[in-house]
Image (cartoon, coloured by chain):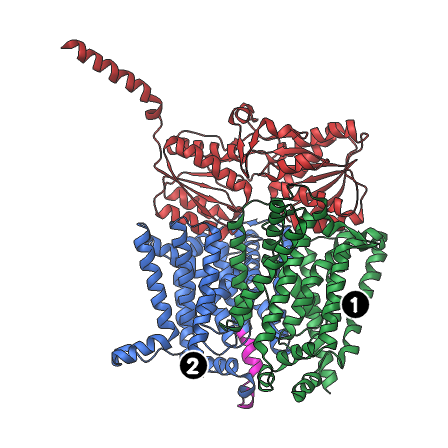
Amino acid sequence: MTKPLGQLLAILATLAVMMVPAWAANMPRRIGYVTNYATHEWYQNVIKGMKARAAELGIAFEVRDANLDVNKEVSAAEDFMSQGVDVLIITPVNEGIVPLVRRAKEQGIPLVLEGSPVKRMTTMVATCDYDTGYLAGVEAGNYAMNHLGGMAKVMNVGLPLLSATVLRAHGFMDGLRTIVPNARLANDIDGGGNPDTALAASTAALARNADINIIYGINDSSAQGGLQAWKASGRSQKNLLVVGTGGEGLGFIHSMNTEPAYKIEAAMFPEKEGFTAIDTAVKLFNKQSVPLHIVSPSAAIVGADGWKKYYSVGENVRTIKWDAVNRLTPPANCMKTSAPF
Amino acid sequence: MREILQSANSTPTPHRLGANSPVVLIVLLALLCIAISIGSSRFYAIENITAILRQCALVLIIGSGMTLLLIAAEVDLSVGASMAFAGMIAMDVTNQTGSVWLGAAAGILFGGLVGLVNAIIVTRLKVKSLIATIAAMMILQGGVFLYSRQAIQNNNQLPAFTAISTGFFGPVPVPVLIAAIIFICTYIVLRHTLFGRYVYAVGSNPQAARLSGLNPERLKQILFIVTGLLAGLSGLILASLMNAGQPTAGRGFELTVIAAVILGGTSLNGGRGTLLGTLLGVLILQVINDGIIILGWDQELQLVVPGIVIVLAAYLDIVRRRAGAR
Amino acid sequence: MQRSPSLSATAGDMGAVAFCNALFRRNEMVLLLCLAMVIVFFSLASGSFFTIRNFANVFGQASLAMIAGIGVGVIVLAGEIDISIGSLAGAAGIPLVVIMNNGGSLELGIAGALALALTVGLVNGYLAAYLGINSLIVTLGSMFVIRGLIYLYTGQKAIPDEQSLESFYQIGNGRLLGTVPYSALTAFALLMGFMYLMRHRPFGRNIYAVGGNPEVARLAGFNVKGIKFICFVISAVLAGISGILLSSRLGSAVHVAGLGFEFQVVAAVVLGGVSLAGGVGSLFGVALGVLILSFLSNGFGMLDVPTEWQEVATGIIIITAVAFDEYKRQRK
């Protein structure tokens, strides 16, 4: 009689030990995420990472789209709160969510920000924009030394509208100057962050001053628009380097495969950012302390095959190679931020 | 019938005041060019001129159709969204079939189809075109993402596809040539054919036009379809220029087009306008856009300056008409 | 021809047949029915829709478009249009926040915001009503110019509220008894006030007359230009009030605030049965139009409908509604 009982106890004990990791952290039941712009590939991949992680942990996960309208974003978050989500994740459209941060605190709902900071936030998961640009800048410098005769004259297809994208461009130039000290920012333009505005603005800028050999785009669309403007003006890609930022979706992989000048990508791994945001949400739910800025890794991808280290591509989808991305160790702090801390 | 056509002509029109009206715009354009070239020697570089003309081509292609539509007292705000969708379809079909011709045809026909739907909603369901085409814009902007959330790339890297926008015919860029042909065709139709006169007649007085046996609905349907086809064509060229179908391309393009047409002296109330004016309006707005960048000014001015110019031009137009009426 | 702006005859003293007729003739009744259908549908589809908290949320969210919608409704009834309201709502936050940041009070900031809105209204009104420039062109121009000036002034950055005045936070975020948003109360008060003006004062009759047929109105001795001018001022000031509440809701003057707001509001006004030709429709209809779109947006969110489908559905709803209006008008 005692023997089976002992066995049963042993089994129960083993089960209990196995359950410990799960018990140690209480799982939130529902997490709501308000995204900036769900039709953009970057956010689709952020959401992909979040969904994957939430499913793993058995958490119900819902998404609302602000569609670039901060007022709509506040409304969506308001709705989530009144429906009783346990944790809220928001990608701020801009600084206009500060009052919302206060309201979430008043209602006792933990709030994780993804992407960009706002005043009075608890925590944010984001890559370092400056550092990402900087890493790509260093690689661009090396490339200029080896292939462009040590010259670096840059056209920045920028987006002054967002502090994050301004930081990327600053980082890029600073990183570049560590290798090519006399690197010059020859054209600094507002490409609107989308390919056709970037194309139109770059075309005019190239007509004004075509004495450049590096095109830097603050996102993949901007780099793409700049490069197409270069091609449309009938120039060869031979002595040109194009650097994109973000690694948002399939676009940059396609460009690296097919465009001879598109050699460097400052990749920011949106899937990983989503994954980390869910983990952070769980921590906040359990009242664990978290740093103000949880850095998500970024890396400079160099050369036509560089992306294969981190991604595999099937029919119209890309799959992240978690091992490779998880091996990247992000810095604890960013070199420079615009955060209103 | 003849009475109508005459009354259409005697309202301050294309032909009579036409000799007068482009003068202001030509002077404005000349002044702008001189001022900018003083500020920057790069303005007259062949490359810059080519770049300006290529941008103009996109606007002028749709602008030609939009001018006819506005003269007939209708408007189409869905052209920007339609461009993006048409570009996606053109690229997709090109990828699937390996034929640029089929892709181009699919993109242009899609634009025509949008025009047809707009035409039916406006003429049959009697929804005002301003509202109908804003709604169409919403539907297309949503629909394009349902079609594909990712940009559609030129997977086979067909050079013929990029040649649509970056190729040259002699010294003339292909899109400029296309725009020129379309401009000349619509110009001849509007000025020298009965159809052109009907357009003015329907726009200035649809009631009277109907009484005289014209079918304004049929005419408007044709104009919506033509504008749609031209939006498809523009979308194709834009996709070729970007070497990909981009779902967000062309956002706000409808306002650029309409601003140029209005600047050219075409009335929003119908019955009045010229294609020559539209051509000048397109050139002026693009020269301003280009000038702001080439002079290295704040790009925010790309919103402010055209805004002022459009209102000013509309005001000058009123002053001129009053003077003419006196 | 002109549909009566008044709902004064109640259904109660009519027979059932008459009631049904009224139901189909009166746009407001159809809209009420639509609103009820929307609410019933989402209540059945989502468990968290039919709650006081959610309704309070929706009324708060609808208030901004409601306030601006009253102004646009008035101006469209007068036969003109104002599409500069989005840029203006965004701009109004700037003097507000800048004045507060420089040590001014909330009241002074609001005065500054309203002064800016008033100025824009006067300019729009002068250009459109007195110089006779097409109002779509005038307000398209001011929409561009104001947005460009916002970007130039702010350097394309949001201006945060540095004083953190409690009163500033409360006007856009606070709730009466913790339930009803103050912004919803403001919108309701303005709606009632303007509905009274439009129905029972000469002010309203003038606007309907001018919008219905400006030529006849002029011959009948109405001051057409003056009336239209005042409508532009009203539209701008209401857009300014909407912008003040928006700025409080966002805790700052956000440079991109109000982008595309004009389309939302015009869509709601048209959905509410106001004809772009002028002279036809009512502010009650506008209010229903705003509420229908707000409840749709809220409900779609709860059902996890993707943005793409929301855009497509909204477009189809607008076309259907306007086509239905036209159909009724022609049958009469």
User: Which residues are the magenta region?
Assistant: C218-231
Residue type, numbered disc 1: Leu
- Residue B286 lies in quadrant: bottom right
User: Is residue C222 in the magenta section?
Assistant: yes
Membership of A306 in magenta stretch: no
**Residue for badge 2:** C201
Q: Is residue B168 left or right of residue B263?
A: right
Q: Position of residue A290 (x, y in %)?
A: 45, 30
Classed neighbour count for the residue bearing mark 1: other residues with Cα under 10 Å, few (<14), some (14–19), many (≥20): some
Mark 2, Cα crowd under 10 Å, few <14 / some 14-19 / many 20+, is: few
In-image side of C285 versus A311 (left or right): left
Chain containing the residue with disc 1: B
Q: Colour of chain A?
A: red
Residue C16 rendering spot, x and y as whole percentages: 25, 78
Can you tell which chain is drawn green? B
Image location (x, y in percent) of residue B310: 69, 67
Q: CA distance from mark 1 to mark 2?
A: 48 Å
| Quadrant in the picture for the N terminus of chain B | bottom right
Q: From the viewer's perspective, is residue B128 above or below residue C49? A: below
Shade representing chain C: blue
Q: Residue at x 70, y 29 (%)?
A: A138
Query: Compared with residue C222, is residue C195 higher up or lower down, i.e. above or below?
Result: above
Secondary structure beneath label 1: helix
The image's mark for residue B28 is 1
